[in-house]
Image (tube, helix red, strand yellow):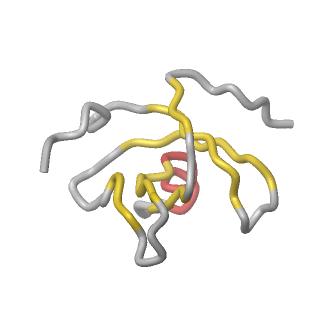
């Protein structure tokens, strides 16, 4: 497996979250446990990452998975209200 260019760096990942019924954006990073990009048993693409905001909130590493399609940004693009 090749090393991720994101490891030890922060980025923003944006995708449609079925759970929330809308597009969400999370501050993210990668660690040695993340699967990063993989194909689910159903045949669709997935991306596994560490949710930085949730990790800070709960004090324990919080993993999340985006499915189907997503985009990476170096700055936050959705404004939280």
Please identify the residue farthest to the right as the structure is shown: 81
Instruction: Reply above or below: 6 against 54.
Output: above
Instruction: Reply above or below: 68 against 14.
Output: below
Q: Is residue 75 left or right of residue 43?
A: right
Query: Residue 46, percent across and down?
Result: 45, 59
At 34% from the left and 53% from the top, the residue drawn is: 36
Give the number of marks. 0
At 55% from the left and 40% from the top, the residue drawn is: 13
Q: Quadrant of residue 20?
A: bottom right
Instruction: Reply above or below: 45 against 7.
Output: below
Query: Residue 51, percent across and down?
Result: 50, 51
Q: Is residue 26 left or right of residue 55?
A: right
Please identify the residue farthest to the bottom as the structure is shown: 41
Between 70 and 30, the residue placed more toward the observer is: 70
At 30% from the left and 60% from the top, the residue drawn is: 35
Query: Residue 8, percent across and down?
Result: 27, 35
Q: Quadrant of residue 68?
A: bottom right
Query: Residue 32, percent across and down?
Result: 21, 55
Give the quadrant of the C terminus.
top right
Please identify the residue farthest to the left as the structure is shown: 1
Please identify the residue farthest to the front as the structure is shown: 43
Between 46 and 50, the residue placed more toward the observer is: 46
Q: Is residue 47 left or right of residue 34?
A: right
Q: Quadrant of residue 2?
A: top left
């Amino acid at each position: 497996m090749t090393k991720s260019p994101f490891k030890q760096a922060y980025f923003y990942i944006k995708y449609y979250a079925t759970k929330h019924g809308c597009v969400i954006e999370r501050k993210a990073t990668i660690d040695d446990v993340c699967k990063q990009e993989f194909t689910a048993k159903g045949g669709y693409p997935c991306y596994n990452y560490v949710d930085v905001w949730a990790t800070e909130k709960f004090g324990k590493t919080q993993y999340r998975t985006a499915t189907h399609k997503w985009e990476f940004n170096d700055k936050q693009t959705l404004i939280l209200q």
